[in-house]
Amino acid sequence: MSEQSSRPFSRRAVITTVAATAGAAAGGALVVNARGDEAPRPSGPERRIEPFHGAHQAGIATPQQRHALFVAFDLEDTDPVSGDRLSSERLAGNFRRLMERWTAVAERLTQGRLPGPMPGAGPQVPPDTGIADGLEPSRLTVTFGLGPDLFERVGRTDARPHRLEPLPAFRGDGLEDAWSGGELLIQICGEDLQVISRAFRALRSRAPGLARLRWTQQGFLGGFGDATPRNLFGHKDGTVNPRPEAFDAVVWADAAEEPAWFSGGTYLVFRKIRMDLPKWDTVTARVQDETIGRRRDNGAPLSGGHEFSTPDFGKKGPDGKPLIPADSHLALVRDVPMLRRSYNYDYGFQPGGAQDDDHEHDDGHDHGDGMPAHDESAHAAFDSGVLFCAYVRDPGEFVRAQNALAGADRLNAFIRHTGSAVFAIPPGAAPGEPVAAKLFPRT
Amino acid sequence: MSEQSSRPFSRRAVITTVAATAGAAAGGALVVNARGDEAPRPSGPERRIEPFHGAHQAGIATPQQRHALFVAFDLEDTDPVSGDRLSSERLAGNFRRLMERWTAVAERLTQGRLPGPMPGAGPQVPPDTGIADGLEPSRLTVTFGLGPDLFERVGRTDARPHRLEPLPAFRGDGLEDAWSGGELLIQICGEDLQVISRAFRALRSRAPGLARLRWTQQGFLGGFGDATPRNLFGHKDGTVNPRPEAFDAVVWADAAEEPAWFSGGTYLVFRKIRMDLPKWDTVTARVQDETIGRRRDNGAPLSGGHEFSTPDFGKKGPDGKPLIPADSHLALVRDVPMLRRSYNYDYGFQPGGAQDDDHEHDDGHDHGDGMPAHDESAHAAFDSGVLFCAYVRDPGEFVRAQNALAGADRLNAFIRHTGSAVFAIPPGAAPGEPVAAKLFPRT
């Protein structure tokens, strides 16, 4: 328990603060949907409302919720009627309209209200799906991001954040278009999957004609409470996250260097990292721990101490070798300043591998292309791993770290990066103003 | 609130009872995994333990948890070394070994213990993945089922439950092999996705050489507490479920007619029903309600009253037509006795439709084959809907209902059945005995 005090970023403490603030702001009265016949309201995280407005968007410094949906869109290229290719002026107008609609929906839903009118729908069409009627917002947050290609598309290369560019190719990457890229991102997080599902439907139903879906990805975390969450390798993931007081130096954009509109913004590096779990599960505990550089049980570095002890990379064992192997993940990734807010994913198994050629419908998402063929059975055809999310003031920090890892990390025998994207995350919106408003064309 | 008393099946009441029982059985002391540095334990549903042993398997009468994973396996056909086709004696032995391993793991994990030794693994290989270290069982249940083909495979057609046969084809079915069938089922339910993920890995890691994965499907429910959950059409789903006191007549196998070993068993009818949400979301509230036969907001039948009012199918409106249309879902499905324990699913969007032909990797699960082509954009390429689960003493009841629906239900314009399976669910196991033990060959 004494170790608790040395934990740099206590989720529970922050949650309590936010909840208290939100409760005070709302005067204790939650505005909720039709629930005439509902039982007494639940207590706990379901009741909590995360603020929408502020200097930064929610969903970044927000204590991590248990579920996340990441959705990428591209602006529509062509006029839906004429089929003509749209000019950058038209695209800029569509971008503006989309952010106005999306911001309004996000603000309303995160605060426990209905999503508002549906543009273009007849008066008899319900403006909401109703699937979350009777549910609390459950710490719903909606966070918007802008991809590298967006700025040229809308004629605002002048306003492009200086560090926003596509990530370079890394050694060992096995990227697939189906999981990569995107001009617009929506990150939807919360404690209730159905509330997230409703938010997503409300947002995407306001996109047709303006933007089209590119990919969706779903992540989860166990209910670890105050403890650091574990990834699907069983290891604690996020131990060295910066303290909130370091976010100005590590997370939020550099005001001196970036365009003024981007003050309070950040960048999200998103990587879908597939884990070869059947292989991992058959190696020894020692191999597992030396691959990571930490003990699985308590998260302590192999040089000793507890989870939050500073690793001693020079400390040697009786064999004269470093206790933390120099090519372990911990040794290679050391001191990279980024706020990791990753989620586990498990997209399940679908037949479709070599031994399943007799299946009539080979439409499953078997990404068994690049993983080591250690297991001949269909058990290897799983797509599980981590949706690595790093919020950084400079994506170059991730690039440097990943270049170091890509060539040497022991973990590479067990993982493959199969999706990749990077987004500029605009600052938070003021009340009455859409996210990214300062990027819009003057009208 | 007065309506609350007429609710036939109160989730909260049952949860409380079960939790109290489990707490008493465990003497208040939960046995949990390595958690030396963990913070105080959470309260709430995470703490609750569902009993494993009993006359019936858990996960049926158990108050519904918020997450579910359904996994189908087939017995391995061939000897892993020689490649020879296995005899039914060998298959029976493999079936027995599998059920012994799986029952041991299920019993341990649901009760908050480690999964036990891993057959065939070296002593240094961790017997557990560790991904749920520090997490409570969170109402984990594991329920096993046996498909129609299993009994012949293991040479026990004599013991086959009398009502276990493949479902017939229904009009309008759009079934895909990738989501259908299976000789063995595991239904894993719980309040924590990571606990479910760990249970699944522990179970499947004990299958290679004995059985191979056929499909996995994941479902969720919002945190509706005592209220009836809503499906992705926004309607309450499960209103007319039988009261627990009716389960003997509706759910549990007919002792007079079934083989003795099956006493306490039941059948699961599993249907993956894809919903055309973009189409649903653009029709009027009246069309939606008349399709279902109920009001979306409070679940009341269109003949009036509240959610639990008895529908009056003869009651007519000013236009002389029944208030509940004769071809509404409610009117057609009336009085079919089954315990529905369905989950919503959202497998997300993957590019791969006609307009996405330029994608390099067209490996998404776009099941856009049979849905009405009302939306030209990629927004129609979503796979969302309901994993319909009905526990019944006679799958013939489902067949009768589905035959009535398949030809006439207004809902058919918005749904398509894309997966189908049926399983006999053996009775609960006694301590020290595997599930389905009475089916095993005498040795």
Image (cartoon, coloured by chain):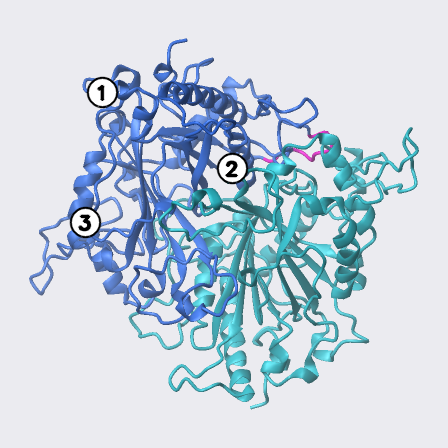
Chain colours: A blue, B cyan
Asked whether disc 2 touches disc 1, contact meaning CB atoms under 8 Å apart, the reply is no
Closer to the camera in the image, B326 or B103: B326
Which amino acid does the dot numbered 2 rest on? Ser
Measured as percent of width and height from the top left, residue A433 is found at 44, 14
Magenta span main SS: loop
**Which residues, given as a range, are shown in magenta?**
A35-42
Which amino acid does the dot numbered 3 rest on? Leu
Instruction: Tell me if residue B178 is in the magenta stretch.
Output: no
For image coordinates 56% across by 76% down, the residue present is B432
Say if residue B330 shows up in the picture: yes
The verdict on a common chain for dots 1 and 3 is yes
Asked whether disc 1 touches disc 3, contact meaning CB atoms under 8 Å apart, the reply is no
Residue bearing the label numbered 3: A405
Task: In the rendered structure, find residue A258 and report the number of the disc placed on it.
Answer: 1
Crowd rating for badge 3 (residues with CA inside 10 Å; few <14, some 14–19, many 20+): many
Q: Quadrant of the N terminus of chain B?
A: top right
Q: Please, is residue A379 above or below residue A345 in the view?
A: below
Residue bearing the label numbered 2: B377
Location of residue A147 by image quarter: top left
